[in-house]
């Protein structure tokens, strides 16, 4: 692999971003992709690339063009995706590449948009994806141990990797063939687990690299978090911050494959949100310190449709709540702020990649990295890494204000065009607008009640317990454990209730005694095992105990993760006169799955199945109940979510398409939620928590392409615990208002029209820009204040300084049009009414048709 840039590329001068795009070779032309210590080199030119994740099976094909277009509009050059082995090889040698798993179609959508693609084949991916993307069947191939120097695993891994590479080659999708795939990845985040595999760890990692290189893709291979990746494979960084990361060889460039803008949450926990100022800070620092490829790991449009694609207990941020944003931006707040950052970085591309760098100390926690090239280009990053104090620094005889924990970008070493802490982009406020389930047939509801315990014939009988996962092989979430026992007239003791004690390896259990529901228990994301004590009333004589054990997705990461089990380990009854009765070694009858699953009640062709019983009104708070209703399409074209906050836990389908598991479990009120979030300082998953005491998930994305426009849409819900199906609603995700908060000291230079040959001297007035979604106009201005307002969107407040004409000036500029700009130097503001006060303009406006 070549590791030096061509000489003619060095002669390019620093051109505006739009002009650079015109000079790029078309993606249909074959590209020679190599690298040196600074960056990838594509067709002889070093490239600085901004990428973002779109995991194709987490959305549907109808969504892909919009998702890719939104990513491109945000400044992305490239899309990153894993390849999901368990979705493609459903059984040994049996492959599936249709619908959500049509990988070739997805790559072509990205190519048609003019974007590159990073293909992370893995084939282990983690990704909060069931079993880390490895097929469950592979665990049951004799002698197989995942991700170590194990011949059965390596054989199947090589076979699948080769299959994917050959498919991409056949379609001519690698850049070396004229396609858009510029990087491929083998394995995933193995470096932190390598030692745990002992003598098999390093040989496996080296084998994986060698196997990948032998595929002859014509593009470089990467291994993220692989500290000993052998040449020429590039090791890359995954983290909240990667500015201090250095590759394991001076010949390799600095790549960031996973920039974590948010963080996943587990059931029962509140939701951490990373402030956009900190995301921007991390990105600016990465490029300041010589980075050249950065990927936002945001799971654009991400959901986990179906039952088998979710990680263990991990839901809200990645898998369920986030998918409400069909355009893939929910988990990256204030994307427009980062879009401006991307423009600023791109303006500096040539100097960053071809210039020489100089480090300057500007104070105890203030510094500058300066890049200069032979054509006279000069780029400076001024950073204040103090997490508390704003500072004024002197650079090249000029003074610059640096807020705490921020980076200023000076593409000419004079003018600040962007500061990471000064969010001057607008904020779109989104509401979930409910719509009742409009019945499209008079016989609105039908139900089917699951039999408690064994339905039909039992699958087998054992003395004692079997492991849940080894029994179901993830073909279903559900496994019935049933037994009976007798109680004589001496029960209970001292007037107290008996207590049923259950220990389980996870993930959950519903308990039924004598056909009555008595309670549930669950593990959580960090500890799937649990213990529960349930007060029970026994009857004299024979008692029937039925325990429905559940999984909610298989373990997806960690050393030897495939050996983590689930299911019951101990069951006993205490509180009897004769002491505790241990039922663990009883004769247990087992039944795999649910009767409704067996009869495929969720499929459209089962709508007339005689098992369904029509009901004028569905029963409420009934466990183990299937519901069916015919519904109309929600109006409009906004993204749709189904609101399940009044249901318990279960599964849902629309027209046979699996929406996925739902579980609106309430988070703890003790999760350290904060009323406000300070962007300053290192981010961690315990910082900036919100939603304490609220449902950890509520809305679940239903793609509009799943609805039949002509009506007759069948919604099927299986409820485990009991809920109120009459309160299920569809909700449309609607942008209802837009806000902006800009101060006069915020940098404002329009990079698309800026002529660097002129000196700005920082005198350009800051501007507020507002824009409603296409088709909507600004219908009213709810708040406007020029002075020193405070607060956040929808809670702005006037300060001690407020210009009385603020509202009228904004209304004149903005009412009844789609977008507008208001300059802080607008002549309507006239005389300075508050000398010495830094002026800010805050606006909140409604958007409507």
Image (cartoon, rainbow, N blue to C red):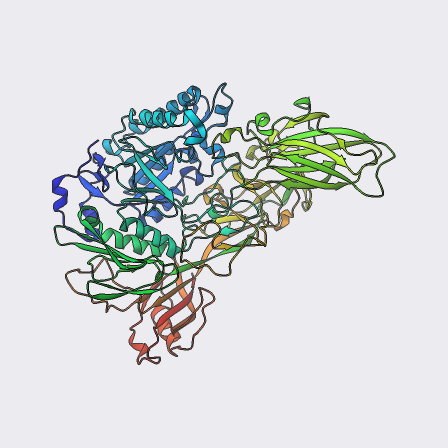
Residue 166 visible? The answer is no
Up the image or down, 9 lies above or below 555; here it is: below
Q: Quadrant of residue 841?
A: bottom left
Which image quadrant: the C terminus?
bottom left
Name the residue at the front extreme: 364
Residue drawn at x 35%, y 74% is: 809
Residue drawn at x 57%, y 26% is: 470
In terms of depth relative to the viewer, which is nearer, 669 or 8?
A: 669
Question: Where residue 136 sits: x, y (%)?
Answer: 50, 27
Question: Where residue 56 sits: x, y (%)?
Answer: 40, 38
Q: Quadrant of residue 426?
A: bottom left
Up the image or down, 847 lies above or below 49; here it is: below
Determine whether, in the image, residue 413 is placed left or right of residue 494.
left
Question: Where residue 514 sits: x, y (%)?
Answer: 77, 35
Determine whether, in the image, residue 456 is placed left or right of residue 470.
right
In terms of depth relative to the viewer, which is nearer, 513 or 224?
A: 224
Residue 422 visible? The answer is yes
Which image quadrant: the N terminus?
top left
Up the image or down, 407 lies above or below 297; here it is: below
Determine whether, in the image, residue 510 is placed left or right of residue 434.
right
Question: Where residue 355 sits: x, y (%)?
Answer: 17, 49
Determine whether, in the image, residue 649 is placed left or right of residue 685.
right
């Amino acid at each position: 692999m070549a590791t030096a840039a061509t000489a003619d590329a060095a002669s390019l001068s620093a051109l505006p971003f739009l002009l650079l795009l015109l000079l790029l070779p078309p993606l249909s032309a074959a590209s020679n992709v190599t690298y040196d210590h600074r960056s990838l080199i594509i067709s002889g030119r070093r490239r600085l690339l901004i990428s973002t994740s779109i995991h194709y099976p987490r959305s549907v094909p109808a969504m892909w063009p919009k998702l890719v277009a939104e990513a491109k509009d945000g400044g992305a050059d490239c899309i990153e995706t894993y390849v999901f082995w368990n979705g493609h090889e459903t059984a040994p040698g049996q492959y599936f590449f249709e619908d959500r798993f049509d990988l070739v179609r997805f790559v072509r959508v990205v190519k048609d948009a003019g974007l590159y693609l990073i293909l992370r084949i893995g084939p282990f991916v983690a990704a909060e994806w069931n079993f880390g993307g490895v097929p469950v069947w592979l665990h049951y191939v004799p002698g197989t141990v995942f991700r170590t120097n194990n011949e059965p695993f390596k054989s199947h891994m090589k076979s699948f990797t080769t299959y994917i590479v050959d498919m991409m080659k056949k379609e001519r999708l690698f850049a070396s063939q004229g396609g858009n795939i510029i990087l491929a990845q083998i394995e995933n985040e193995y470096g932190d687990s390598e030692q745990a595999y002992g003598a098999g760890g390093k040989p496996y990692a080296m084998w994986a690299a060698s196997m990948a290189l032998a595929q002859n893709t014509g593009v470089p291979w990467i291994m993220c978090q692989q500290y000993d990746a052998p040449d020429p494979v590039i090791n890359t960084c995954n983290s909240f911050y990667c500015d201090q990361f250095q590759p394991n060889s001076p010949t390799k460039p600095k790549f960031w494959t996973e920039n974590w803008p948010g963080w996943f949450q587990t059931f029962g926990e509140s939701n951490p949100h990373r402030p956009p100022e900190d995301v921007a800070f991390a990105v600016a620092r990465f490029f300041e310190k010589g980075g050249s490829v950065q990927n936002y790991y945001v799971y654009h449009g991400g959901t986990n449709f179906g039952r088998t694609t979710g990680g263990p207990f991990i839901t809200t941020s990645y898998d369920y709540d986030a998918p409400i944003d069909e355009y893939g931006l929910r988990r990256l707040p204030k994307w427009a702020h980062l879009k401006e950052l991307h423009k600023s970085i791109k303006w500096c591309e040539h100097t960053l990649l071809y210039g020489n760098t100089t480090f300057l100390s500007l104070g105890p926690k203030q510094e500058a990295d300066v890049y200069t090239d032979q054509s006279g280009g000069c780029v400076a990053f001024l950073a204040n890494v103090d997490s508390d104090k704003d500072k004024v620094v002197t650079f090249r005889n000029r003074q610059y204000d640096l807020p705490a924990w921020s980076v200023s970008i000076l593409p000419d070493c004079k003018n600040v065009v962007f500061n990471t802490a000064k969010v001057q982009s607008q904020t779109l406020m989104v509401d979930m607008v409910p719509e009742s389930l409009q019945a499209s047939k008079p016989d609105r509801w039908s139900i089917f009640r699951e039999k408690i315990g064994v339905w039909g014939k039992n699958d087998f009988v054992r003395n004692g317990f079997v492991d849940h996962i080894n029994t179901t092989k993830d073909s279903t979430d559900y496994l019935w454990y049933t037994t009976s026992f007798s109680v004589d007239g001496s029960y209970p003791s001292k007037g107290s209730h008996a207590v049923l004690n259950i220990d389980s390896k996870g993930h959950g259990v519903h308990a039924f005694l004598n056909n009555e529901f008595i309670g549930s228990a669950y593990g959580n994301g960090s500890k799937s095992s649990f213990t529960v004590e349930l007060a029970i009333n026994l009857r004299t004589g024979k008692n029937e105990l039925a325990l429905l054990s559940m999984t909610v997705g298989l373990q997806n990461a960690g050393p030897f993760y495939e050996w983590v089990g689930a299911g019951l380990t101990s069951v006993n009854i205490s509180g009897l006169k004769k002491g505790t009765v241990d039922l663990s070694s009883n004769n247990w009858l087992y039944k795999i799955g649910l009767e409704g699953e067996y009869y495929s009640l969720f499929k459209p062709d089962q709508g007339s199945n005689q098992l369904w019983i029509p009901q004028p009104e569905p029963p409420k708070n009934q466990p183990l109940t299937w519901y069916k209703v015919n519904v109309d399409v929600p109006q409009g074209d906004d993204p749709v979510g189904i609101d399940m906050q009044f249901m318990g836990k279960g599964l849902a389908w629309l027209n046979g398409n699996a929406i996925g598991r739902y579980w609106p479990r309430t988070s703890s009120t003790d999760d350290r939620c904060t009323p406000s979030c300070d962007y300053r300082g290192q981010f961690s998953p315990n910082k900036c928590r919100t939603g304490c005491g609220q449902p950890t998930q509520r809305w679940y994305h239903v793609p509009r392409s799943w609805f039949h426009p002509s009506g007759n849409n069948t919604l099927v819900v299986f409820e485990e615990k009991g809920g109120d199906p009459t309160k299920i609603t569809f909700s449309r995700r609607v942008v209802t208002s837009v806000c902006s908060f800009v101060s006069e000291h915020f940098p404002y230079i329009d990079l698309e029209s800026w002529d660097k040959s002129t000196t700005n001297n920082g005198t350009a007035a800051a501007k507020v820009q507002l824009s409603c979604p296409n088709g909507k106009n600004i219908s009213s201005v709810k708040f406007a204040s020029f002075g020193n307002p405070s607060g956040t969107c929808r809670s702005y407040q006037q300060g001690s300084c407020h210009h009385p004409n603020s509202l009228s000036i904004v209304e004149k500029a903005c009412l009844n049009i789609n977008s507008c700009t208001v300059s802080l130097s607008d002549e309507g503001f006239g005389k300075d009414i508050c000398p010495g006060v830094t002026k800010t303009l805050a606006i909140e406006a409604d958007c409507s048709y």
